[in-house]
Image (spheres, rainbow, N blue to C red):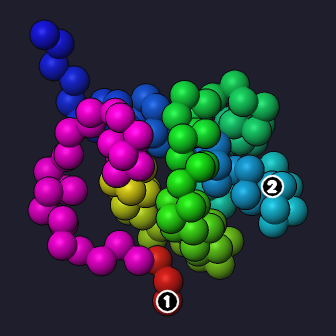
Amino acid sequence: MQLILPCEYSVKEILPAIRALIAEKLVEEKNLSIYKTADLMGLTPAAVENYLKKRRGTAVKEILRRDKEFMEFLENFSDKVVKEKNINSISSYYCILCAEGKKVLNKNGYKLSHCIVESALGAYNFSLKE
């Protein structure tokens, strides 16, 4: 039996899918340039282009995209990314998006364990609405 740490799967599959979805929202829906999107997300323009051209972040992206609640959450986060002046202040929201993404994947048959942050914050309201 192989030990897979909770955040290992997140870093390899969930976070790239989340970044791909955010990049799509910012470029295609909010009409931002790849360069502005890269700046807002703390990525390189090449990384954003890879997400947009489906070279990265494709493994679980469509499962996440089909979940209405998750996509509403992601929409609120995308708005926050555009409005926020300091990208460091939004970095912790990725943990919240990851936790929400795991919930979606678990509903769809994946067996992903919770990290200690998810366990400790189980009763926390993760709403991004102001």
- The 10 Å Cα crowd at callout 2, few under 14, some 14 to 19, many 20 or more, is some
For disc 2, the marked residue is 27
Residue in the foreground of this view, choosing between 40 and 110: 110
Distance in Å between CA atoms under marks 1 and 2: 23 Å
As drawn, 106 above or below 29: above
Q: Is residue 11 magenta?
A: no
The residue depicted at 70 percent of the width and 50 percent of the height is: 23
The residue depicted at 46 percent of the width and 32 percent of the height is: 13
Quadrant of the rendered structure where residue 106 is? top left
| SS state under label 2 | helix
Extreme residue in the top direction? 1
Q: Is residue 114 magenta?
A: yes
Q: Is residue 30 left or right of residue 121?
A: right
For disc 1, the marked residue is 130
Q: Which residues are magenta?
A: 102-127
* Mark positioned earlier in the residue sequence (1 or 2): 2
Q: What's the amino acid at mark 2?
A: Val
The quadrant of the picture occupied by the N terminus is top left
Residue 61 coordinates in the image, percent (x, y): 58, 39
Residue 52 coordinates in the image, percent (x, y): 76, 39
| SS state under label 1 | loop
